[in-house]
Amino acid sequence: MRGGSVAVVGGSIAGCAAALAVSRGGAERVTVLERADDRLRDRGVGIALHSDRYDELREAGYVAPEMPWAPLTRRVWSVRDGEAGHGRVVGEQPFPFRAYSWGSLWSELRRRVPDGVSYRSGAVVTAVEPDADGATLRLADGYEEHFDLVIGADGYRSVVRDAMFPGADATYAGYIGWRGTSPDVADLPSDGNDAHNIVFPGGHCMIYRIPDGVGGHRLNWVLYTAPPQTDGLHPDLRTPTSLPPGRLNSELTAHLRALVADAFPPYWAARVLRTPAETTFIQPIYDLEVPHYTSGRLVLVGDAASVARPHIGGGSVKALQDATALEAAWVAGESWKEVLEGYDERRGTVGAAMVALARRMGDAQVENTPDWTAMDQAGFDAWWQAQNSGSDRRSGFGGHSMKAG
Ligand SMILES: Cc1cc2nc3c(=O)[nH]c(=O)nc-3n(C[C@H](O)[C@H](O)[C@H](O)COP(=O)(O)OP(=O)(O)OC[C@H]3O[C@@H](n4cnc5c(N)ncnc54)[C@H](O)[C@@H]3O)c2cc1C
């Protein structure tokens, strides 16, 4: 397939990768429409990429070794044990991941978007009107344009998805992720090469080092737990939303801080509680699946297509893999129909399998946590295995292998 005008709605990780994919595939004119202005792009949070998935994506030309990253080799799961500083280790596992900061991953992808692509910041798409030959996009500033193909890379509240499958919305999983980063990286155990997972009844907290973008590191953490069902403490999260820094309900913050002080080993409690408040924010956790990744001339990539709970550590990988699959389908297809069917076939079942695995992990790690105090390495291994037992080649912790098909 050669030619065609393509709009990519959303210019984040999935959007930049999709713009690269269709440019390489041979699209004639590519326009990225991103709601945010450039200042908002610099999210400081961490993203961990499984090393094997990274290798595949590097071979495919979507990521590069020069992007700043911090190596992770092992994940240590610990529970509070009285006043023992680091708590008690309930289990250890290999953790071959590369830790990135979201901002550096995005910048690298943005840099790779070919010069010929028009990337428009501050462009808010308000309506998507499909027809037999493509779709018309309407923007908040009154601008409208018709494209042969529209790619929805606009995240979990996608307007493109809404035009394809009205009502196929993200569903609140019943708990939140509370995230933060800090410069507090001195004297980390194992020189900072371990990821730490602090477990407690009703949740867990992942802690690991990420690059700070200027040659050093920051400490990145994300704590998953259900907010208490008390008026004022539990914002209405059934409608997909996010609460930016500074907008965090102060009572909820106080609740989370008390949980950390009470349930974390003292060493890790201090690290989390020292985090500057302005770097912390809440992300409600959602599940999202769609019947297909394409409909007519509309296509979904990344979180717009499916959202797997973050315990699986594969959301960005999935977004990047969606783009590589779109490129492959574009190169292989002789017509729009072939391109779109080929892409849906490659990715639709992967998205659903990842969501299912992430649900099992959320159930085991947050919603129905085991008695951590009784767990040892053998018990941990069996518990971990049980979460993964339903996986096949289309899913897996850290994302599925593209080589597996
Ligand atoms: C707590 C948490 C931890 C995570 N940890 C990891 C991890 O360790 N590893 C990992 O791989 N993944 C992780 N993820 C997942 C990962 O962040 C996402 O899967 C990934 O960033 C997908 O990006 P995306 O481009 O599809 O969506 P988004 O990053 O949400 O981008 C959507 C873009 O579309 C734009 N947009 C939206 N609507 C419009 C519109 N109407 N008009 C124009 N533009 C619009 C938005 O401004 C935004 O820039 C985590 C997620 C969460 C919530």
Image (cartoon, grey):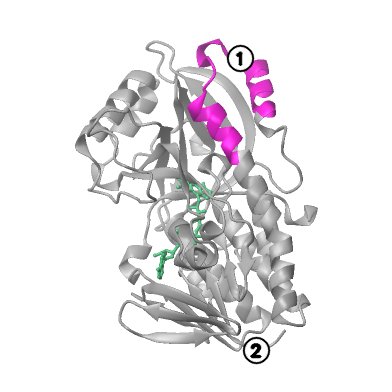
Q: Looking at the picture, does residue 145 appear above or below residue 169? A: below
Q: Looking at the picture, does residue 127 appear above or below residue 69? A: below
Which secondary structure lies at badge 2?
loop
Write the residue at 58% across / 51% down: 289
Does residue 369 belong to the magenta stretch?
Answer: yes
Amino acid identity at mark 2: Gly
Any mark on residue 376, and which? 1
Q: Position of residue 313 (x, y in %)?
A: 56, 44
Write the residue at 52% across / 16% down: 372
Any mark on residue 146, and which? none
Rendered image quadrant of residue 272: top left
Q: Is residue 383 left or right of residue 126?
A: right
Q: Nearer the viewer, residue 240 or 13?
A: 240
What is the CA distance from the residue labelled 2 to the residue labelled 1?
Answer: 58 Å
Amino acid identity at mark 1: Asp
Badge 1 crowding class, 10 Å Cα cut-off, few under 14, some 14 to 19, many 20 or more, is: some
Quadrant, the N terminus: bottom right
Q: Which residues are magenta?
A: 358-386
Mark 2 vs ligand 1: CB under 8 Å? no
Q: Position of residue 330 (x, y in %)?
A: 70, 76
Q: Position of residue 214 (x, y in %)?
A: 39, 58
Circle 2 is placed at which residue position? 3
Quadrant, the C terminus: bottom right
Q: Is residue 96 visible?
A: no
Q: Position of residue 312 (x, y in %)?
A: 58, 42
Which secondary structure lies at badge 1?
loop
Q: Nearer the viewer, residue 63 or 402?
A: 402
Q: Looking at the picture, does residue 124 appear above or below residue 385? A: below
